Image (tube, grey):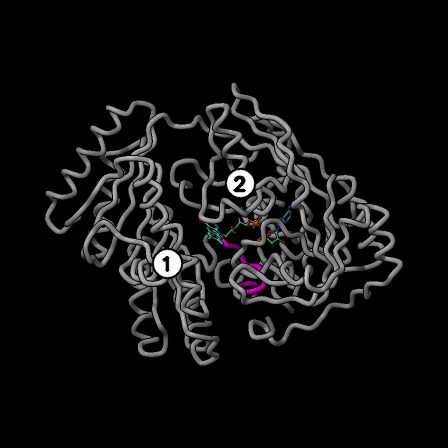
Amino acid sequence: TTEIHPGIKRGAFSQLTDADVSAFEAIVGGDHVIKDADEVLSYNIDWLRICRGQGQLVLRPKTTEEVSAIVRHCNKRRLAVVPQGGNTGLVGGSVPLFDEIVISTSRMNSLLSIDPVSGVLVAEAGCVLEQLDREAASQGLMMPLDLGAKGSCQIGGNLATNAGGLRLLRYGSLRGTTLGLEAVLPTGQVLDCLTTLRKDNTGYDIKQLLIGSEGTLGIITKAAILCPARPKSVQLAFLGLDSFQAVLDTYRLARRSLGEILSAFEFIDSESMRAVKQNLGLSCPLGEHSFYVLAETSGSNETHDREKLDGFIESVMSMDGCATDGTVAQDAGQFAHLWSLRERIVESLLVDGYEYKYDVSLPLADIYRLVEHMRTRLDGRVIRTAGYGHLGDGNLHLNFTTPKFDAKVLELIEPHVFDWVRDRRGSVSAEHGLGLKKSQYIRHSKADFAVRVMAEVKRLLDPNGIMNPYKVLPDE
Ligand code: FAD
């Protein structure tokens, strides 16, 4: 971790005492206070294995009241805490930096209700996304978000990071699909905004502050999510293309000819495809291409949807300079396999050793220019420069790998990559958040005054600064 921000110093927080541990044991019960160093270790290390904190204690509350009592104690004693869900975050936000106490939401995993008519699902923060989606399916509904980490990430973590994912293009962001939310604020106060109404214009929408706050303004404990109807027919086309312009042209055509049934449009470059093939042994049904595209449709009438998709593929294949090769998933197995080529890229890159991971938004025309520019800049110094992402959202995942951490490589990447994005009015974090790793670059994408307002809000809600310190806001 110190490689990321060597300058950051521990805040003026108290040190944990035996009396604190006893107080926590009285709140959650001894079994749910983890002190054993080996057990605590996994809560200290992030998914990318880049950030490692020195936390000594993990608390696993079961109810909002327990979270509130813990936080109230921590605030009174000025003990710093870090909320943790599935620990799949990619910017170092979910693990301690120094000795912050980890508050894990994993035991808060009850589904509270699903209304099949309105489509509103109410769940505790620790519910795993994939499990919620399964529950939603039993009522003919689906979760409005889907991402590669769905088997481990929790809805509270999704909300805290405002996770985007594979189908934002169709269902929009959690800022729109979250109807209500309950959270424990840094003073221990419970903020009950858990309404299930679609319309509620009664002044400021406080829950929006919690969405995307990455655990710095409070601990989300419950949420009400609006779930769309589960599509009766889902189709997936997988295309091979030989230029990025062809990817853009194909996207334009997909929007025009698939219209309302288009539910995802993802692109993968040849280097990312090579990583899943070489490092995970996955097979690609198409030959070698510079780019691959997954275009998914979700609708209610299979014949109609298939006709539309076939028409799209025909046009794309016949258009000069567009897709040169393609296939359509014929069954659930092929569908899952094609999606795994995209969803498992993150995991495949880790096999190279050390991963430098960037997640940026750019105007579509600039998206792949950044990958080419960086590939030239880092030529000979990295194993690979790989670009893929949610094209429909203008979101590029840009990755570099080396066998182990190389400070020279990092110096060539940062701040250069952020400057490049800023100069094109892009965002230095499209969907992963700022966490620890990107917080110092917030001003590249946010006006100075906006950052000052953020700091004021933080001070108002968290006067002692105990809630996930060192994250999101820059150290100054
Ligand atoms: P954690 O990692 O535990 O925490 C993330 C942040 O939220 C931390 O700052 C933490 O303090 C805070 N937090 C967690 N729970 C709470 C809570 N209850 N209240 C307040 N704060 C909380 N992201 C995308 O947006 N789109 C993708 O497509 C995508 N794909 C991914 C694929 C893989 C394989 C992986 C590993 C990650 C991916 N991510 C993606 C990153 C994404 O941020 C997380 O997967 C997910 O949203 C985090 O949920 P989590 O429960 O694991 O949260």
Q: Is residue 140 left or right of residue 108?
A: left
Quarter occupied by the N terminus: bottom right
| Element at label 1 | helix
**Does residue 58 sit above or below 410 in this rendering?**
above
Respond yes or no on whether mark 2 lies under 8 Å from ligand 1: yes
Mark 2 or mark 1, which is nearer to you? 1
**Nearer-the-camera pick, 363 or 281:** 281
The residue located at (40%, 63%) in the rendering is: 349
Quarter occupied by the C terminus: bottom right
Q: Which mark is residue 308?
A: none
Q: Is residue 69 left or right of residue 280?
A: right
What is the residue that sits farthest to the bottom in this orientation? 408
Q: Answer whether residue 301 is visible to the viewer in this image.
A: yes
| Element at label 2 | helix
Respond yes or no on whether mark 1 lies under 8 Å from ligand 1: no
- Which residue is labeled 2 in the image? 129
Say whether disc 2 or disc 1 marks the residue closer to the N-terminus.
2
- Which residue is labeled 1 in the image? 280
**Nearer-the-camera pick, 449 or 409:** 409
The magenta-colored residue range is 432-439
Label 2 crowding class (10 Å Cα cut-off): few <14, some 14-19, many 20+? many
Residue type, label 1? Leu
Q: Is residue 46 left or right of residue 457?
A: left
Q: Main secondary structure of the magenta part?
A: loop
Residue 97 x %, y %: 65, 66
